[in-house]
Image (cartoon, grey):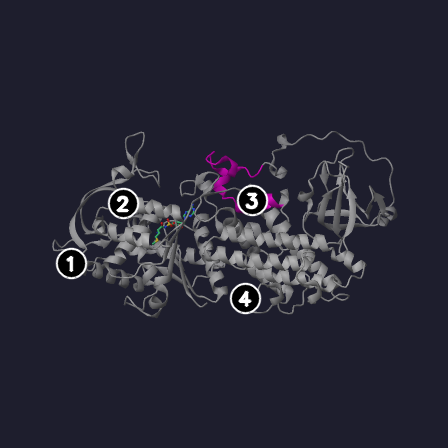
Amino acid sequence: MNQPFYITTPIYYVNDVPHLGHAYTTIVADALARFHRMLGDDTRFLTGTDEHGQKIEEAAQKRGMTPHQLVDEVAPRFAEAWRTLGITNDDFIRTTEPRHKQIVAELWKRISSAGDLYLASYQGWYCVGCEAFYTESQLVKDANDAWICTTHKRPVSWVDKERSWFFRLSKFASPLIEHIERHPEFIQPEAYRNEVLSFLRSGLRDLSVSRTSFQWGIPVPEADPDGMSHVIYVWLDALTNYYSALCDQGVMAGPLVEKFWANAIHLIGKDILRFHAVYWPAFLLSAHLPLPKTILAHGWWTVRGEKISKSMPATRIDPLKLADGLGSVSHFGMPIGIDAMRYYLLREVPLGNDGDFTFESLFGRYNAELANDLGNLINRSLTLITKFAAEAPPAYDDRFHSDGTENPSFQLESIAVETCRSVARELEACAPSRALEHAWRFVGGANRFIDQTQPWAMARGKNPALGHTLWTLQASLWLIGRLVAPVLPATSAHLRGWLGDTGPLVWPDSSTGRVLVTAPALVATMPPAPLFPRLDEKAQATILARILPNDALAAPVTAPEIRSPPDRISEILSPSDRIAAPALAPPTSLISFDDFKRLELRAGRVLSAHAVPKAKKLLHLTIDLGEAAPRSIVAGIAEKYAPEALVGRQVLVVANLAPAEIRGIRSEGMILAAGDEAILGLSALDQDVPPGTRVR
Ligand code: MSP
């Protein structure tokens, strides 16, 4: 333990404001940093902004500003966005800060004194979007015969015989190949490592590392005999941020450098792999500085198949709006929306792969994994624990926790240990998607534990194992509060609060082969509302209205699906799209208000749903009505609803209907649904209310 862990994000260009792609990298880094802090590792997390270069100078010109004005306006928007999203970076570096500029100049001097710089003139293609030089073999031609950059899909510009300092990059191909071969962890994932190796094996050309045709950059700290003034190539400047942020003012050393540098993990998008895996280590080798530990590349997010870009408004999902929209339907507001966004981004795509963002998959995962699996488990467990606490206080009892396959608490303990280890293993390997997959196996296990043990039935039967069963559930929630903390920090904080878990947020110790037993004494309370209320069509429409950029809604058909949110959202159908309802006769027999008052309607939440064997219309539901035990209700809705679609849903229940026996199953009420012969829809409320709330 207490290993140094240093994770960095790319520093973002300030010609743009934060979008979902930037947020993705930053959130991955944040989750890994949070995990390492829980392990007790000495953790440092750096992000920042890239503020020099032709691209920024041109962006400022376009807006009629000086580059200084532009960077001072936009850089704080990145810092502010990360603050709002609860990102736990320890430092935020701007390349216009003196502490950075001094170190870039120092690095230049080292490279120069190593004899790796020479003056010549550069002639060739340059992509301002990438801030990179290209050979024709790296470009493609468009219909007008112009050379096009494959990343920005824009024509590159011709730099005609510009005087430049050159870096002897060619000299470093072999040392780099050797380093990569000796250090398999240096470039990850493996596919990117192979890509870099084949690039290196094809040989390297020397690199132009200064420009004279514009001025917005760090001046080259040595004189050009021809008296020309050069600024340092923006990638040499920018890459140095990872090192300069650790340095004591003005010197290329200091305690932070000593502790963290050799442990650096640079998390980057695959688009900037070459700069990080070839140029950066070559600069460092030339300057006789150690190399970072790992370059960890992730894939690209597209939005409905389109790359996120400035010129495509429909792809520009604002992460702050997304988090705010997702949070707007939860009692707990934006922090829970942030968690939902983090969960989706980290779970949907294994790190390294490309991913396509769609609202269908976002809402699908939210409803299935956050509302149904996790949210439901938390609600069910806390309801049971608090309800039965007086008669069976949750307490560990060795008799019910010992080895034995028939013992449900012991089985859950085994899953807990296995999960705790595999989640840690995956997070250590920087694989958050797989880590979440494992964590959800335990969530599933705990939900099954409730179905299997049926604590309400244990209470009815005065079963002596009830206290231990409730303790097992409580300890499981305690464990989940930790397993999900790196990715779902707000969820973890709320859950720990409801459990009265005030201990330090450290990773659970499963080394003894038991982990639930390490949970401290807890006193659980009931949450005021579910954390992740199910998103029905109306909630989805509300969220979309808050998230989608106005220009995306108005934009021509660049990304049609984005312009119109998922088809199922009936609220946004135009009147002509709606199916005309036949005119109905008014109801015939009237009842008095007193008759109506005799009807006891209550809001309930479906805890479980199963098909009734040999009855194709019937489902057997258990429904939480806020009573000591859930109700068993048989409902004729199987032709319209799959059982798994109902779990977690809120429904309206006639609570004072005399119980009946249907197909041998006791039915203690009726749920309200629309339709005569065929069921057309299920009753619902427009917001979540505690189970048992009276409906009038
Ligand atoms: N300023 C350079 C990086 C210098 S690092 C020394 C730069 N900046 S950027 O603003 O263009 O941000 C690039 C990074 O943002 C990518 O490497 C990636 O981490 C993230 N992303 C931007 N768009 C993205 C997607 N569509 N998908 C995933 N990540 C993306 O390049």
Badges 4 and 3: C-beta atoms under 8 Å apart? no
**How far apart are the alpha carbons under marks 4 and 3?**
37 Å
Amino acid type, mark 1: Ala
- Look at discs 4 and 2 and give the one toward the viewer: 2
Amino acid type, mark 4: Leu
Q: Residues within 10 Å of mark 2 (few under 14, many from 20)?
A: few
Residue at label 3? 545
Residue at label 4? 505
Mark toward the start of the polypeptide (1 vs 2): 2
Q: Most prominent secondary structure in the magenta stretch?
A: helix
Residue at label 1? 223
Q: Residues within 10 Å of mark 3 (few under 14, many from 20)?
A: some
Mark 3 secondary-structure assignment? helix
Amino acid type, mark 2: Arg
**How far apart are the alpha carbons under marks 4 and 1?**
54 Å
- Look at discs 1 and 2 and give the one toward the viewer: 2
The boundaries of the magenta stretch are 539-566
